[in-house]
Image: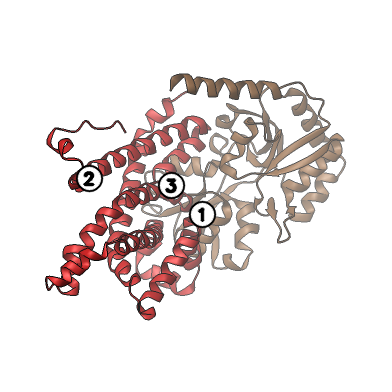
Chain colours: A red, B brown
């Protein structure tokens, strides 16, 4: 066991970390923004609105993320029009955007279904009460359905975020030097796969735990009204992660 | 945690030691890549073909041992040898000082130079100036990767692929400006194919032994001296009895062994 190559190449890992962080945060951010309207459409009873979204989530949840990324990068990239397009728009030659597109659509599909479930789980009494107060449909969504749906979706969504982080490791397959990509370069240069991948596993581990900590904090805040009263009054002792 | 980790390693070591008993080499498992035409590739019906494959079979016949070919992705091919997934690597692996730290090599069984490929009409020249800002596709963990990273690392962006085939795909899609690889692999695997018709060689033949080693040899685990001698003797034998030449002529119209 010799970890010196890891320390000597810490910069490579650091760059890899930034690439992973950017890729995952953008994919999650865009995916989330997409998923809210999609989830509302998905709850519609009109098959013309509901159907396309169903097909979208069905496809992206039914196929592996790696396949989706290959379809984007190698599949689309071989088409003549994409070759010509990428001569004009040079950013299209960069593998980063293909991975981002695949990750975004994938996480959008999962998040849509998570939020749809949460919306459909809204107690009907809350909706009726809102109607009775004279709220319009959109106001009901804004003030009643969505806030409570987001709360209910949070535990499942935190899982999705962590899956996305771990799933992002496949970006290294299409030449992107993300965290795993950095590890693969080190492993192949020094023939030390054990050390290189233990180190990268440790980094993913740290990020995952930071994320879990963040979501724990958020859950504590958002579910404050559900906790027994005495626990809210006295400062609650944090459970170790 | 610490205890758990050391327990895991102790078990791993014990397993390794148990398999390290002396062998009399009735059966040799050989690691090949299977994605590096014309040296090694998989046909549509799943059969391994290529120069490396034929050489491997000829050597086994010469050594009178039973051979089992195992395909393995390139960037894990040395770790898998060390993990005893097979006993020798016949996969166009160049004999370099770096690799010698981990494995032993036989004598070379062929030697061909490395070359750059560019798109016809792109006018890219292989100089530090001409390469500035260009993207070069290489296969990860190859001599070509090391060479371009160390010599032109400041000028070019290096894109690393798991297999040579993936690099060809991206060259065809215009995502890399240049490829650096073995000249024969580039010629037969890419330039002579339909997708490679718009591309051409550029620049000199690279053979600097500091980067490109002493030709392609067969890698074996350190300390397997008996197997090394058997393989060296077999290489000499098929060179002498004409089997090597007949395999060479099947794939190439020039002397692939080098001087």
Left or right: where A119 falls relative to B52: left
Q: Name which residue lies at 20% across and 69% down.
A: A128
- To which residue does mark 3 refer? A169
Q: Where residue A47 sits in the image (x, y, percent)?
A: 39, 79
List x then y, in percent, for residue B111. 67, 42
Q: Residue B179 carries which label?
A: 1
Depth-wise, is mark 2 or mark 3 nearer the camera?
A: 2
Give the label on residue A139, or none. Answer: none
Crowd around label 2: few <14 · some 14–19 · many ≥20 (10 Å): some
Percent of width and height locating residue B138 = 51, 49
Q: Distance of mark 2 from mark 3, alpha carbons?
A: 26 Å
Task: State the residue at coordinates (33%, 74%).
Answer: A44
Q: Looking at the image, is mark 3 or mark 1 nearer the viewer? A: 3
For mark 2, give the secondary structure. Answer: helix
Judging by the rendered image, the residue that carries numbered circle 2 is: A218
- Are dots 2 and 3 in contact, CB under 8 Å? no
Q: Mark 2 or mark 3: name the one nearer the start of the chain.
A: 3
Q: Looking at the picture, tell me which residue is in the foreground, A203 or A6.
A: A203
Q: In this view, does A234 lie to the left or right of B53?
A: left
- Whether the residues at callouts 1 and 2 have beta carbons within 8 Å, the answer is no
């Amino acid at each position: 066991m010799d970890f010196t190559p890891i320390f000597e190449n810490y910069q490579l890992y650091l760059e890899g970390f930034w690439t992973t962080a950017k890729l995952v945060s953008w994919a999650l951010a865009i995916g989330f923004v997409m998923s809210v309207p999609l989830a509302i459409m998905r709850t519609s009873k009109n098959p013309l609105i509901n159907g396309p979204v169903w097909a979208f989530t069905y496809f992206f949840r039914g196929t592996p993320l790696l396949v989706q990324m290959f379809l984007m990068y190698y599949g689309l990239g071989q088409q003549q029009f994409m070759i010509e397009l990428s001569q004009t728009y040079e950013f299209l030659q960069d593998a980063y955007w293909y991975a981002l597109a695949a990750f975004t659509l994938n996480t959008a599909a999962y998040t849509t279904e998570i939020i749809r479930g949460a919306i459909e789980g809204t107690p009907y009494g809350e909706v009726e009460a809102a109607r009775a107060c004279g709220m319009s449909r959109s106001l009901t969504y804004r003030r009643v359905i969505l806030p409570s749906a987001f709360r209910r979706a949070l535990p499942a969504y935190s899982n999705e975020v962590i899956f996305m982080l771990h799933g992002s490791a496949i970006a290294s397959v299409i030449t992107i030097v993300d965290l795993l990509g950095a590890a693969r370069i080190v492993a192949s240069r020094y023939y030390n796969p054990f050390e290189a991948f233990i180190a990268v596993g440790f980094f993913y581990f740290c990020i995952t735990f930071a994320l879990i900590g963040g979501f724990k904090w958020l859950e504590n805040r958002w579910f404050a009204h559900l906790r027994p009263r005495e626990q809210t009054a006295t400062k609650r002792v944090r459970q170790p992660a | 945690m610490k205890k758990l980790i050391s327990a895991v390693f102790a078990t791993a070591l014990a397993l390794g030691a148990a398999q390290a008993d002396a062998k009399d080499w009735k059966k040799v498992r050989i690691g090949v890549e299977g994605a590096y035409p014309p040296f090694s590739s998989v046909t549509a019906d799943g059969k391994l073909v290529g120069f490396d494959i034929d050489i491997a079979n000829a050597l086994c016949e010469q050594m009178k041992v039973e051979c089992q070919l195992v395909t393995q992705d390139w960037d894990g091919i040395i770790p898998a040898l060390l993990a005893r997934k097979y006993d020798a690597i016949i996969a166009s692996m160049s004999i370099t000082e770096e690799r010698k730290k981990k494995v032993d090599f036989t004598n070379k069984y062929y030697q061909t130079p490395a070359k750059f490929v560019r798109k016809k009409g792109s006018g890219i020249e292989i100089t530090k100036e001409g390469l500035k800002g260009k993207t070069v596709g290489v296969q990860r963990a190859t001599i070509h990767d090391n060479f371009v990273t160390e010599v032109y690392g400041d000028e070019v962006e290096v894109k690393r692929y798991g297999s040579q085939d993936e690099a060809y795909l991206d060259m065809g899609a215009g995502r890399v400006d240049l490829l650096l690889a073995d000249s024969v692999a580039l010629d037969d695997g890419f330039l002579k194919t339909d997708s490679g018709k718009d591309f051409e060689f550029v620049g000199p033949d690279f053979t600097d032994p500091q980067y490109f080693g002493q030709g392609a040899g067969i890698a074996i685990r350190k300390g397997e001296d008996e197997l090394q001698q058997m393989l060296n003797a077999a290489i000499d034998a098929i060179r002498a009895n004409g089997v090597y030449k007949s395999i060479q002529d099947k794939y190439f119209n020039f002397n692939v062994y080098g001087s």
